[in-house]
Image (spheres, rainbow, N blue to C red):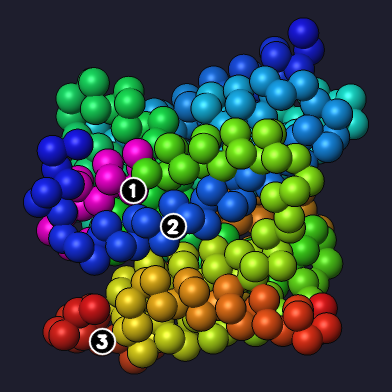
Amino acid sequence: MRTIQRTPPGLVRDAVAIAAAMIAIGASFGAIAVAYGMPAWVPFLMSTAVFAGGAQFLAVGLLAAGNPVAAVLAGLLLNARHLPFGLAVAGTVGPRWRDRIVGSHLMTDEVVAFTLAEDDPARRRRTYWLIGVTLFTSWNLGTALGVLLGGATGDPDTLGLDAAFPAGLIALIMPSLRDGRTRAVALTGAAVAVLLTPVLPAGLPVMSALLGLVVLFRPGKRREGPFRPGGRPEGR
Amino acid sequence: MMVVAAILTLAVGTYTMRLGGVVLRDRLELSASLQRLLPMAAAALLAALAATATLMAGTGLAGVARPAGVLVGGLLAWRRAPFVVVVVAAAATAALLRLAGVP
C-alpha cells in the first residue's frame, strides 16, 4: 500500500472510523450466522464472496429458514443498486481490466459515497481503493471475530451503530446535496423509497429512488434558473 | 450443498451487477447530459438507503433512538462537521437514548 504515504490524514482517519464500525457489524453478522445454526464456513464464504452487508443479513436468515431460492432472489434484488453505482464510479475504477475485475468486487454503498464526495479524479481513485480495501478487510475480520466469539460480541444497536451508518452516508452525500438539482432528486427519491418500504420487497424501494430523477424533467424547474450554477462556490 | 450453491449464485450475481455497471459505462456511449445524471442517480440511491435505514425497521417504523441519532449526525454534517464527528455523535446519541430506556 504505497499510496498510504500520499493519502491525506483526514481520509485515513475516516477509514479507521468506518473500519471500527465494520468490525463490530461484521462480528454481529458472524455471530448471528452461527446462532442460526449455520456451519462456520457459511459466514466466511458470504463475507468474502458476496461482500454486501445488507444482502448477507437478509440471505443468511432465509438460508437458515431452509429457503435458499428466496435467499438468492432477495439478495440479488437488494444488490441491484450496484449496477447504477457501477455506472457512476466506472470512471474512477478505470479502463484497465485488472482494476475493473478487482475494483468491482470492492464496490459497496460506503465506497461509492466516499468516492463521489471527492471532486478531483486522482483523489477519487485513491479514496475508492483505500476505503474499498479497508472495508473488505475489516468486514471479514469482524466476521471472523463474530464466528469465534459468538454471542459474546453483543448487539451493535447497543452501541448505536444502526444510527452511525445512515448518518455517515448523509455526511458523505452532503456536499452533493448542496447542489439544488441533486438535492431535489435525492430528497424525492428518498421519500419515494420510504413510502414504498411497507409495500415492496426489500431492495425495490431503494431502486425506486431512481424515480427521483423525474423532477429534472418537469417544465419550469423551481428556483434553480438556467443561469444559476449548481452548488455553492465554497464547496464542502 | 444447496447452501453453497445459493451463496455462490448470490455472489456471482452480485459481482456481475457490480462489474456490469463499470463495463457498461464505456459501451453505452452516454450523452454528456445523461452522464451528468449518473452522480445524481447515485446520490438518490444513497439518500434512499440512508432514509430507509433511519426510519424503517423491516416494513414498519423504527423506534425513536435511531432516528434521533441520525438527526443529530445529519445536523452536524449540515454544519460541515468532520465525518468521524458525525458518525460518533449519531452512535452516541442513539446509544445513550437506549441506555435511558428509549426504544
Residue at 18%, 25% in the rendered image: A96
Q: Which secondary structure lies at badge 1?
A: helix
Secondary structure, mark 2, is helix
* Dot 2 or dot 1, earlier in sequence: 2
Of callouts 3 and 1, the N-terminal one: 1
Q: Is residue A192 visible?
A: no
Residue bearing mark 3 = A225
Locate residue A123 relative to residue A171 in the image: left or right. left
- Residue B72 horizontal/vertical position (percent): 54, 86
Tag 1 residue? A131
Name the amino acid, label 2: Ile
Say which chain tag 3 marks.
A
Q: Are marks 3 and 2 in contact (CB under 8 Å)?
A: no
Helix, strand or loop under label 3: loop
Q: Residue at x 77, y 63 (%)?
A: B57
Q: Which residues are magenta?
A: A118-133
The local crowd at label 2, few if under 14, some if 14 to 19, many if 20 or more residues have their Cα within 10 Å, is: many
Q: Quadrant of residue A164?
A: bottom right
In the current view of this chain or complex, which residue is farthest to the top? Answer: B1
Q: Position of residue A31 (x, y in %)?
A: 73, 40
Is residue A39 at least partly visible in the picture?
yes
Q: Chain of mark 2?
A: A
